[in-house]
Image (cartoon, rainbow, N blue to C red):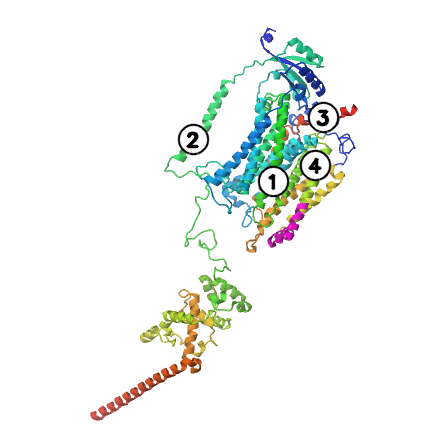
Amino acid sequence: MSLAIPNGLDNSVERPGERAPLVLDDTTFHDITETVCQVAERKPNKAWVIGFLISFALLQWFGICILYLLYTGVGVWGNRSPVFWGWPIVNFVFWVGIGHAGTLISAILFLFRQDWRTGINRAAEAMTIFAVVCAGTFPGIHVGRAWLAFWLAPYPSLNLWMWPQFRSPLLWDVFAVSTYGTVSLLFWYMGMVPDLATFRDRSKNKWRRMAYGLLSLGWSGSSRHWMRYEKSYALLAAFAAPLVLSVHTIVSFDFAVSQVPGWHTTIFPPYFVAGAIFSGFAMVLTLMIPARTMLGLEKLITIRHLDNMCKIILATGSIVGLAYGTEFFIAWYGQVPEEKFAFLNRAFGPYWWAYWTMVSCNVISPQLFWFKKFRTTPWIIVIVSIFVNIGMWFERFVIVISSLSRDYLPSAWAYFSPTWVDWSMLIGSFGLFFTLFLLFCRLMPVINMAEVKWTLAKQHHMSHEDEH
Amino acid sequence: MSETNDKKVHGIAAEYTSVDTLMDACRRVRDAGYTKTDAFAPFAVHGIDKALGIKPTKLPWIVLVCGLTGTATGLLMQIWMNGIDYPYIISGKPFISLPAFIPVAFELTILFASFGAFFGMWALNGLPKFSNPVFTDPRFDRVTDDRFVLFIDSTDSRYDRAGVEKLLGDTGSEYITTVLEDDSPSKVPKFIFTTWIVVMALSIIPLLVVLKMRVTNSPLPRFHVFYDMDFSPSKDAQQSTTLFGDARAMRPDVPGTVARGQMDLNYQTGIDVEALAKIDSPRAAMLVRALDDAEAKEEAEAAAPAAATASVMETTPWLTDNPREISMETLQKGQEQFGIYCSVCHGMNGAGNGLVNRRAQKILAATWVPPSSLHQDSLYADKYPDGKLFNTISNGIRKMPGYAGQITTENRWAIVAYVRALQKSQNASIDLVPVAKRAAIEKRKAAVDKKLAEQAAAEKKAAEESAAKAAAEKKSST
């Protein structure tokens, strides 16, 4: 792959006093419609078909593993005393974290009026939904008797005659993750309705027209509708911003509220949130860079978008690195022997390999992004972002497994080893994620056309003003 | 064209190709006094609400109410469920622990407010609505692509077809059209209702079956989708199982297990275990296990031949001191226990002539091994340390069974103490007696000696008498 950027597509150069264009190459409104709609309208290309078949096979395997687990019991996992919170929780926290970039891009960057988000927010939101779906499966089946998972809901049960225990972070988690999933879904779907109306109006086929007609709810593009829609969008963004911070904070409470050395720390909420955004942006880049090439979206998802996301990765990656350092400092400064041991054990104990994988992937690899060359070279970005994903998975692994496997009593120590079901479910969850994402690429507008058109109009308007 | 004339006119629409021309047109239409107007655009055109004179939406108020409802629901729900209806103590927190209730209340606030923003927006927009007169014009399809449309409703008070067309014509529109009311049938076809009702009716059947099964009795076994732990394979102590290699359902202690309260091995065994560990560490390790494990003891004995056992008895580092505090009380306890368990064979004075022994001698029991006299030299403390004596009491020797089962460890040490006292008493010199008591002892000894002397004299006299008598009889007979 060459490092050269196609002519006219480099918008990463800073020109003082001038805003870089976010939509490239003298694009018109109609070009945007064509570019985005052709993704769903033309026949799928080979790469998509191969990718889909692989993901779908993995999804089947995931389903078989879940059935095997339900039939046999959670003993098929490697969770043994003392590591009862094993692999599934690692996967849960990992996937929840992945979801955060979507909401961050669509909500927080919206509130900060960062127009560059419009090119990537749709796919990022879709990623959020699918990541939450993946995340949700793990605690769902982790409860042991998964068919009774609805006992977590506060409903007047005729069997139990009792209520859930609201003083437990695990129950807060149920509310946080389900609220997060629901609000993200509403936000995502609402953002798509005008674009689905575009799909409806372009469809030649009767069934397509009917399906997109139903999904677009009769959207007509009326200004009154747009006005309420924008208000509603802003309100949802305003809710989603604190929501996204609260979700991972509450996930971190699952750990921080316990007494386990290495978990019982006040740094967890901010540290988890930063890590979640970090991993989420890495996943957005991992998905978007191949997608923009394969789907022909280079004019809308520009080098500048990638550049900006790399800067966020660099920032959050450094925050995460600082958090690792702070944890060590506090463990030493706090002088709790168990705490000190927990951290030395992480770095030099039996899981040293996981710890140093985590550090090299999360702290060292994003430092490449200090150099503009790396921030604007797609294949390097993909490699670094995959490293970050691996590192963030290992971060959760290190936190969950190393603390549990060696806590207070040496007599209760044990080494955790995953079983083949553990491995299969981790890989299978990627199958679920990619199947959903690839279907999304085929069936839904992958780029928020309405917002990109708005960005383009604003861009034209501004250049207009310059002429005056 | 008569058909077209029959249809009511919905309004007039003009098409534009750029935002700027649309905005200009909007302002002109607004200034001309039209209020029932609308603009259609592929994206949200900022400022168009002002240009058209659209009032701000009341959506934020709806959202506020929804959000507050969410907060109240979250708090009241938790207070009711965990504080009032089903209060239970969790790590000492109060029943109504507000700080712990904040996360859920927060999440529900967001959830309800988001529902308000989402559904409120659609409701205010009158959506979903799949039939719209403007959709009848195929050119309107491009509104979601790159065209902009300005529409004036025929119900507007200033509406006048010719005037509106002229006004719109002046705004630079290339395409002006009359939008007719959509007269396509608005009734939902009957078959959709029929299908819907049938599907609903069918889908309720499984639910009804489950409900019936829940409230009625049946002689048939319960239908299990998931077995849960309803049929867990529990075993009784003496049953066998295939789960373990040795087929025993009751599991023996794991090697190295030390039962609660048995940490002081010296006290339990009478052996200086630390010293033993130095010279014979496997046996020291075995001791820990053997304490409660008869099987292990048997194995150990089987492994070690009798001759070897003897030598082991010699080489074991027995405790030389009684670990129990020696007091009058201890000795009395030992005396009592000795009386109960030991005296039957060893005799009250430990000379080895208890009732059982006497009876065995009398009936000439063939396998009987007479109990040792506790006063023989080899059983004194210098040759037979306290620990070894304790071990003998505990585990037995020759014909003597182990008494560990009957006598508590504490009492066995008390017996050891008493035996030592007994041994001492049989060979005591007067020097050992406290000076104050010596006189009384001497006096008593003198009395006893005198009595013994008298007795001996009497016996001697009687013997002489009988001998004389016998001689006299002999003499007389001859």
Amino acid under disc 4:
Met
Q: Is residue B413 above or below residue A300?
A: below
Dominant SS type (magenta):
helix
User: What residue did someone put label 4 on?
Assistant: A309
Residue A53 is at least partly visible in this image: no
Q: Are marks 1 and 3 in contact (CB under 8 Å)?
A: no
Residue corresponding to mark 2: B208
Q: Secondary structure at mark 3?
A: helix
- For the residue pair A364 and B244, the one nearer the viewer reads as A364
User: Nearer the N terminus, badge 1 or badge 4?
Assistant: 1
Q: Please report the bounds of the magenta region as a residue range.
A: A322-349
Residue B243 among magenta residues: no
Residue B343 in the image: x percent, y percent?
A: 37, 72
Q: Amino acid at mark 3?
A: Lys
Q: On the rendered image, what quadrant is the N terminus of chain B found in?
A: top right
In percent of the image, x 67 and y 42: which residue is there? A388
Mark 2: amino acid: Leu
Give the amino acid at mark 1: His
Residue A462 shows in the view: yes
Are dots 1 and 3 on a single chain?
A: yes
Decide which of tag 1 and tag 3 comes sooner along the chain. Answer: 1
Q: Would you name the residue on which mark 3 appears?
A: A458
Mark 3 belongs to chain = A
